Image: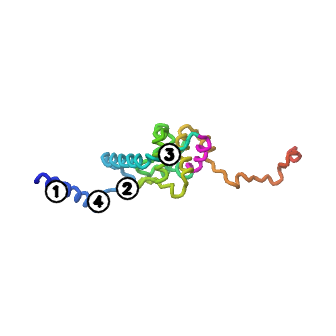
Amino acid sequence: MKFLLGILFTVFVAITGIFITVTSGMINIGADRAHSPLVYDFLETARTRSIEHASKNILVPNLKKAEIISSGGADYKDMCAGCHLSPGVNSTDLNSGMYPKPPNFTEADVVKRYQNEAGARQSFWAIKHGIMASGMPAWGATHDDDRIWAMVAFIRSLPDLNENQYTMLTTRLDDSMLDMSFDGEMDMSGDGSEMQH
């Protein structure tokens, strides 16, 4: 009985100590200071296991189709590149000030974890639901599943892209770009009369 009371007392003291430490405001939560290795490992394990568990039943579409890869490019540029970088860009103002550092999706060794089905599910889940207290937003609030899968497909191909390929795949074409007017300089009727010099 004394042993059990000793354990309960130790647990009570530990919980009280944690409560006092947290409520005192003495813990530095600044993003310019790293966690201790113990805290970092604890949080990384919690994040990894949580995403693995939450994503285990997600069905993965065919992410190797060219159209799904290319359709994710513009969204990646608009929503992800500021943190996760792009070919030829080693850091951004946003990326430089974040802790923990967002993964650099231009690096093949980082992206290889998303190449299998489990990794694709986890990537989809993280993009859709975000990650608390990390700077990773929940894009599912504004984007449907098809657009999120397209971003997953694009991320999986990103390490293979050079700067020119990246620019081509991430340029968002809108109606004003597609509706070019030549104001009479060129006759598009097909007879070629206006194109002669």
Q: Report the quarter where the C terminus lies.
A: top right
In the image, what residue occupies the spot 49% across and 37% down?
Answer: 108
Q: Which mark is residue 22?
A: 4
Q: Nearer the viewer, mark 3 or mark 2?
A: 3
In terms of secondary structure, where does tag 1 sit? Answer: helix
The residue tagged 3 is 59
Where is residue 74 shown, x and y percent of the image? 59, 49
CA gap between label 4 and label 3 equals 40 Å
Q: Is residue 130 left or right of residue 75?
A: left
Upstream in the sequence, badge 2 or badge 4? Answer: 4
At label 4, which amino acid type do we have? Val
Crowding at mark 2 (Cα within 10 Å: few <14, some 14-19, many 20+): few
Relative to 107, residue 184 above or below: below
Q: Nearer the viewer, mark 4 or mark 3?
A: 3
Where is residue 62 shown, x and y percent of the image? 56, 41
Q: As rendered, which of 111 and 93 lies closer to the eye?
A: 111
The residue tagged 1 is 9
Q: As rendered, which of 62 and 23 lies closer to the eye?
A: 62
The residue tagged 2 is 30
Describe the colour scheme in one phrase.
rainbow
In the rendered image, residue 75 lying in the magenta stretch gets the answer yes
At label 2, which amino acid type do we have? Gly
CA gap between label 3 and label 1 equals 47 Å
Upstream in the sequence, badge 4 or badge 3? Answer: 4
At label 3, which amino acid type do we have? Leu
Q: Are marks 1 and 2 in contact (CB under 8 Å)?
A: no
